[in-house]
Amino acid sequence: MTTSPRGLAAMLLPVGLLLVAMASIQSGASLAKSLFPLVGAQGATALRLLFAALILSVLLRPWRLRFNLNSLRSVVIYGIALGGMNLMFYLSVRTVPLGVAVALEFTGPLLVAIFSSRRLIDFLWIGLAVFGLWLLLPLGRSAEPVDPVGATYALSAGVCWALYILFGQRAGADYGTQGAALGVLVAAFCVVPVGIVHAGAALLDPVLIPVALEVAILSTALPYSLEMVALTRLPAHTFGILMSVEPAFGALSGLLFLGEHLIASQWLAISVIILASAGTTLSIKSRSNIPELSAKD
């Protein structure tokens, strides 16, 4: 049975939004590293989330929503996961190359994909993604060892990423793109105090504002709004497998903006990961077959 043009467009739209979101967030991560010498990873995360919360609040006005206990719980967990994901990731990229940190962080979405899959074909794409991640990690003799502390932070970010996917889908189902604004508000409430404790008055330096605004837009306001739209239109396992392309965006951003050069096996890994993402995109089912992930118990 052939797919109608309208059905094909409905399938490709959330995929396209997700790719734009990933490119934006990795470009913002490269830019954010310029703030580390001034306010540290904690301060950079705090500034990013604070400005993103302000931007999304003005644009989406989430205070106009009506809440109930179950949906509010999903939003709070989504926001805590979002804040933890950002903080742990920035702590990791202090000592781990951007592409490698994203690859380690991807263990979260990969677990979502594994535990949510029901068809044999999904495990083929998962296997390709795992192989690509194995190639991407610097395990060969010509690569430098990964800093264990930075790797632990990246893996912790992966745990938060898995929660972000699951509870972000529920928050999006209840509040749409305004769920992203609510989540960022919760994340800012959790992380900004950490940044204040670490950086103190340095956060008030007006020189930081332009860069912080750019990071907030590229790394949070734009991509999380786009991801919220994608989350409500894709099943959890498809979203998780599609996120396998994130290490490729991270590696390319590290190369272009930070001068982090890749070895041949890592370029091969990028190709394998893109293949896995393309495969799962082609196997996306219709919206009516998406597994229910509502806020109801």
Image (tube, grey):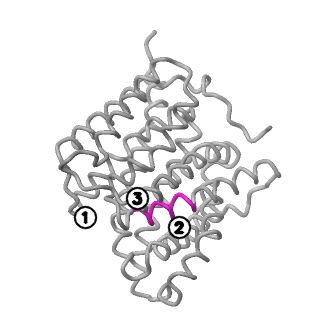
Q: Which residue is mark 1?
A: 258
At which x and y percent is residue 195? 54, 77
At which x and y percent is residue 25? 41, 57
Taking the spot 40% from the left edge, 58% from the top edge, the residue there is 148
Mark 1–mark 3 Cα distance, whole angstroms, equals 21 Å
Q: Which residue is mark 2?
A: 52
Crowd class of label 3 (few under 14; some 14 to 19; many from 20; radius 10 Å)? few
Taking the spot 64% from the left edge, 28% from the top edge, the residue there is 291
Q: Tell me the magenta residue range.
A: 83-92
Q: Which residue is mark 3?
A: 148
Magenta segment includes 90: yes
Is tag 2's residue or tag 1's residue first in the polypeptide sequence? 2
Numbered disc in front, either 1 or 3: 3
Residue contact between numbered discs 2 and 1, judged by CB atoms under 8 Å: no
Q: Residue furthest right?
A: 69
Q: Quadrant of residue 213?
A: bottom left
